[in-house]
Amino acid sequence: MEGHSSRDLTCRGREFDSAGWSRIAARLANHFEAIFEEQEDAKIRVAGTNEGLIRVGILQIAFESPRREGQIAIELTDGSGEPPVPFLERLAPIFADDLSMEIVATLNQRDMSVIRFHREFARDASEWAVRYRFDRLRELGWIAVVDEVRRRGAHEKICRATRPVMADGAPWANAPRKLEKTESWLAFTRLAGLVKESIASGAFDVRYDRHLTWSIVNLDRVGWENVTADLEKLEAFICEEEKQARKRIEAGAEPLTMVVGLGAFESPSGRVKAP
């Protein structure tokens, strides 16, 4: 990650109002699409040349931080016992699957059964697919059964999101001292800590427009420069939105404490041949 002079990773907590945050969420979504357009342009630029492509990881994450003055979701149930697998391994299946993310987000807001969730939110999926994800999320400690009702001769389990157990043995706990001093590592550990805090409190999924994308793309030199330049413009846009939101907050708008993380760095797999 430190091998490229133009690599970047930033993470900051910021104060916005709802209007400012909505504009930022839309800008993040647009930038996500633009990244893959840049990849297609890179393939065209290197076609017929000897130039290879750089494998790049691009992170965009934005979510609400816990509100210190009170609960912002329903009263989440306690996770049961020690987590069956480490935190990041439990987190990965959720972020890799849109339906699982929607289940966790919904159960942060209200109790729900498999049947009801399928009827209201997932008619495009089979009831079996929804039930499988409910069971998997229960195994991973993200949701728990809080009630059971009998309907039409069958027992229907009512589930709620948990305050998931957070293990202290994070994968970066034994990082080399040389690595611990780097700016990128400090930004990463700060981001990981804020994500854990937000998920544990129930704040992470409160807003439907929270954003998390982790993209692996293949870029040429020009594409890499364009992507990092666009990230700098995005950072400047967020700073300006923060200034404008501050004026509206002073005039009476409700403040929102949000975390925004942006990153772009070369993948350790190195250069690849253009397809």
Image: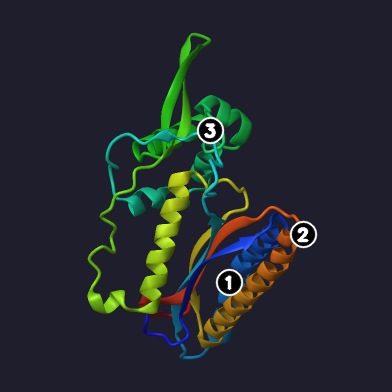
Q: Earlier in the sequence, mark 3 or mark 2?
A: 3
Cβ–Cβ under 8 Å for marks 1 and 3: no
Disc 3 and disc 2 in contact, CB within 8 angstroms: no
Task: Residue at 64%, 77% (x, y): give it.
Answer: 236
How much space separates mark 3 and mark 2, taking CA atoms? 48 Å
Q: Position of residue 159 (x, y in %)?
A: 47, 29
| Image point (36%, 73%), residue name | 185
* Residue farthest to the bottom, as pictured: 50
Q: Position of residue 115 (x, y in %)?
A: 54, 25
Indicate the amino acid at tag 3. Ser
Q: Secondary structure at mark 1?
A: helix
Q: What is the spatial separation of the Cα atoms under label 1 and label 3, in whole angstroms?
A: 32 Å
Cα distance, mark 1 to mark 2?
37 Å
Q: Which residue is mark 2?
A: 251
For badge 1, the amino acid type reads: Ile
Q: Which one is earlier in the sequence, the residue at label 1 or at label 2?
A: 1
Front label number (1 vs 2): 2
User: Which label was assigned to residue 51?
Assistant: none
In the image, 262: left or right of 172? right
Residue at numbered disc 3: 126
Question: Which secondary structure, mark 2?
Answer: loop
Q: How many numbered circles are shown?
A: 3
Q: Residues within 10 Å of mark 3 (few under 14, many from 20)?
A: few
Q: Residue at x 56, y 42 (%)?
A: 72
| Figure quadrant of the N terminus | bottom left
Amino acid type of the residue that numbered disc 2 sits on in the rendered structure: Ala
Secondary structure found at label 3: loop
Instruction: Judge whether residue 76 can be spotted in this image.
Output: yes
Within 10 Å of the Cα at label 2, are there few (<14), some (14-19), or many (20+) other Cα atoms?
few
* Depth order, front residue of 42/91: 91
